[in-house]
Image: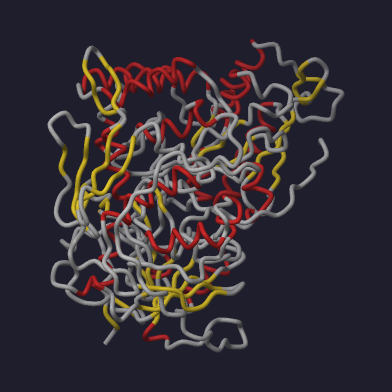
């Protein structure tokens, strides 16, 4: 095997953050536009409370009946509270994903609900609106909305958040600049988002209207006064602003900083939170504290919820049903039966096309590995039956939802699909392509296959401690032996080596490695496909947006540019089907399972009343904190 040199440990970054999607640069560009004006200048926010005591186990000592404990949100230590930064590794407090932002500390104009696909107002007052030519999306800020220092949230805050992202963000806001031309304050309360307009079929249309809708449910409004201070105290230096801990940060959400150490992150309820106004929730959330405990492995996190020390687990639990069926524990999931959660995500093995591994750039080799992998075994061993099969939902670029499946002509791609464990077909493909076995190189069943005298040899990787992903990659490695390709497992730590290599533009260490896909959002399946195969992300360092295998196909890019401009469903179906044809032919990656975008397993020995299927509340099962799921914090109550 080739020698592995692990990169230096780096801090974990938030996914898909609008403010800092790429890593630091040496040059700090000067602002390119005049900053928005207006808004209030508040007094300094109150200091956080003093740090609490911790027990012998290192866990912070706060009343159990006042605290909602989470696990699985993060791996590694949090670095601060700065929502502008991509280096805080603090997803309990801040995370801006395509399926909705985490809303416990910072807030968005709207809350996305994955169950019905709708946006519900949060900071915004009522629905957003479009102007006649759809060049502008507007909304107003609620009169009741305030920052934790008591000053009002204004349209000027929203406009200045955009201005700082463009002029001081690590990548100049490259994720959103092709879609949004500007965000301006029409007055103190009215926000206008101006679309980038493009010509399509003799008409000017928004570059991506659906992404503009996604924006208002994904991206925080930050306080203008605090951002101004962040710029001033760091001299406008992007790297310094990114590394600033933000301990003095202003926030509009129901919780604020309380305690942070190597083991946990804890937030305390803001008793003056504006959301108790009648125009919003009408009351405060039930828990006084919320906290996330960082466990080193899934097994340790599983033991914590079994022992009643964790209330909401955002991690995979093997044979989760046995916890209530055999052990009688007060533990439940959204569905009482398989798959227990909503399978919206598709964890995927990416082929690193920068790797020098023999054969990895040949679609025949890639498809042979994908066809030989036993996905039923992955479901049984890695997912313990918590995943629908590829027989039930044939392989494509779509998840299991009916809305996405309706955009695919499956008959057109059926001849390209595979269900797995097709050893004979994979061997036949490799034989026909000239990858002969060499009985003298020590491989099984006639030896390893070779290319120009070099063994077809690759590593298969997942982050260390992610037990279900590791179990999946063990099945992939076993498939290699059955077809004469030497696949060896390698599990680097997530908090540094794995994420650094995964997001690098030119990494050559990883060969086949697992990454998630995006789940349910206002722009699916377009956004997921973009993240899997769009070349807009290739060659980008610190890339958290997608296409980590560096695949390039001009026709894919052409189709992805067209889809957001088309409303005709028949045309969209034809284009999506063509994308699936290309994907199943070139096989730049291969999904290993259908999986929940976020797990939501709850312990109901302390708190009860969590969302569950059929309860009529329409609250999505995403950890009582993502998008409209934060409504759960107002529904739960203490047991008894």
Q: Which residue is pictured at 79% across the width and 30% down the height? A: 443
The residue closer to the viewer here, 87 or 591, is 87
Residue 420 vs residue 461, the one in the foreground = 461
Residue shown at the point (27%, 24%) measured from the top left: 565
Residue 117: give x, y in percent of width and height: 23, 46
Q: Quadrant of residue 438?
A: top right
Which residue corresponds to the image point at 78% horizontal and 23% vertical from the top-left? 446
Query: Is 469 situated left or right of 321 in this image?
Result: right
Image quarter where the C terminus lies is bottom left
Q: How many marks?
A: 0
Task: Identify the colour scheme used.
Answer: secondary structure
Quadrant holding the N terminus: top right
Q: Position of residue 50 (x, y in %)?
A: 51, 86
Determine the image quadrant of residue 251: bottom left
Q: In the visual, does 230 lie left or right of 524?
A: right
Q: Can you say whether 94 is above or below 2 in the image?
A: below
238 or 625, which lies in front?
A: 238
Q: 544 left or right of 119?
A: right
Whether residue 335 can be seen here: no
Q: Residue furthest right?
A: 440
The image shows residue 48 at horizontal and vertical percentages of 46, 80
Q: In the displayed structure, would residue 23 be above or below residue 46?
A: above
Looking at the image, which residue is at 22% across and 32% down? 135
Occupied quadrant, residue 566: top left
Q: Is residue 398 visible?
A: yes
Q: Position of residue 369 (x, y in %)?
A: 60, 28
């Amino acid at each position: 095997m080739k020698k592995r040199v692990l990169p230096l440990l780096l801090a974990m970054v938030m996914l898909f953050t609008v403010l800092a999607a790429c890593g630091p640069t040496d040059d700090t560009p000067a602002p390119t536009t005049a900053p928005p004006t207006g808004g209030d200048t508040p007094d300094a926010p109150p200091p956080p409370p003093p740090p609490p005591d911790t027990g012998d186990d290192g866990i912070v000592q706060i009343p159990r009946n006042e605290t909602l404990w989470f696990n699985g949100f993060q791996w590694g230590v949090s670095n601060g509270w700065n929502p502008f930064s991509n280096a805080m590794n603090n997803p309990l407090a801040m995370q801006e994903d395509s399926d909705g932002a985490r809303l416990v500390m910072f807030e968005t104009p709207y809350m996305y609900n994955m169950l019905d696909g709708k946006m519900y107002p949060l900071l915004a007052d009522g629905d957003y609106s479009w102007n006649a030519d759809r060049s502008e999306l507007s909304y107003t800020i609620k009169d009741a909305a305030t920052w934790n220092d008591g000053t009002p949230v204004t349209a000027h805050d929203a406009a200045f958040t955009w201005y700082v992202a463009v002029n001081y963000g690590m990548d100049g806001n490259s994720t959103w600049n092709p879609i949004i031309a500007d965000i301006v304050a029409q007055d103190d309360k009215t926000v206008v988002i101006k679309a980038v307009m493009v010509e399509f079929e003799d008409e000017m249309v928004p570059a991506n209207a659906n992404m503009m809708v996604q924006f208002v449910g994904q991206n925080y409004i930050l306080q203008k006064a605090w951002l101004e201070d962040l710029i001033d105290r760091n001299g406008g230096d992007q790297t310094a602003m990114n590394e600033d801990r933000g301990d003095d940060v202003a926030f509009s959400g129901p919780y604020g900083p309380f305690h942070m150490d190597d083991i946990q992150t804890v937030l305390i309820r803001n008793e003056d939170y504006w959301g108790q106004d009648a125009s919003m929730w009408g009351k405060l959330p039930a828990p006084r504290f919320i906290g996330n405990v960082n466990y080193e492995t899934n097994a340790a996190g599983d033991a914590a919820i079994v022992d009643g020390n964790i209330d909401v687990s955002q991690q995979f639990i093997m044979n989760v049903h046995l916890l209530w069926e055999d052990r009688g524990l007060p533990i439940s999931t959204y569905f009482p039966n398989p798959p227990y959660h909503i399978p919206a995500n598709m964890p995927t093995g990416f082929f690193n096309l920068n790797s020098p591994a023999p054969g990895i750039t040949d679609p025949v080799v890639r498809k042979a590995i994908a066809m030989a992998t036993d996905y039923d075994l992955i479901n049984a061993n890695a997912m313990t039956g918590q995943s629908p099969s590829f027989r039930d939902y044939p392989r494509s670029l779509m998840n299991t939802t009916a809305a996405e499946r309706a955009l695919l002509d499956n008959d057109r791609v059926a001849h390209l699909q595979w269900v797995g464990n097709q050893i004979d077909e994979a061997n036949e493909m490799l034989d026909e392509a000239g990858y002969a076995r060499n009985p003298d190189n020590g491989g099984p069943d006639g030896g390893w296959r070779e290319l120009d005298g070099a063994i077809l040899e690759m590593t298969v990787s997942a982050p260390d401690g992610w037990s279900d992903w590791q179990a999946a990659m063990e099945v992939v490695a076993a498939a290699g032996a059955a077809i004469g390709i030497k696949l060896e497992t390698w599990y680097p730590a997530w908090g540094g080596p794995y994420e650094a290599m995964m997001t690098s533009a030119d990494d050559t260490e990883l060969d086949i490695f697992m990454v998630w896909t995006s789940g349910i959002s206002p722009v699916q399946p377009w956004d997921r496909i973009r993240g899997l195969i769009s070349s807009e992300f290739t060659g980008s360092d610190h890339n958290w947006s997608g296409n980590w295998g560096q695949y390039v196909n001009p026709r894919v890019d052409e189709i992805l540019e067209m889809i957001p401009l088309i409303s005709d469903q028949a045309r969209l179906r034809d284009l999506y089907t063509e994308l699936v044809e290309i994907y199943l032919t070139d096989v730049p990656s291969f999904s290993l399972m259908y999986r929940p975008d976020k797990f939501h397993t709850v312990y109901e020995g302390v708190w009860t009343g969590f969302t569950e299927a059929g309860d009529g509340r329409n609250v999505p099962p995403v950890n009582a904190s993502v998008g409209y799921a934060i409504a759960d914090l107002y529904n739960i109550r203490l047991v008894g």
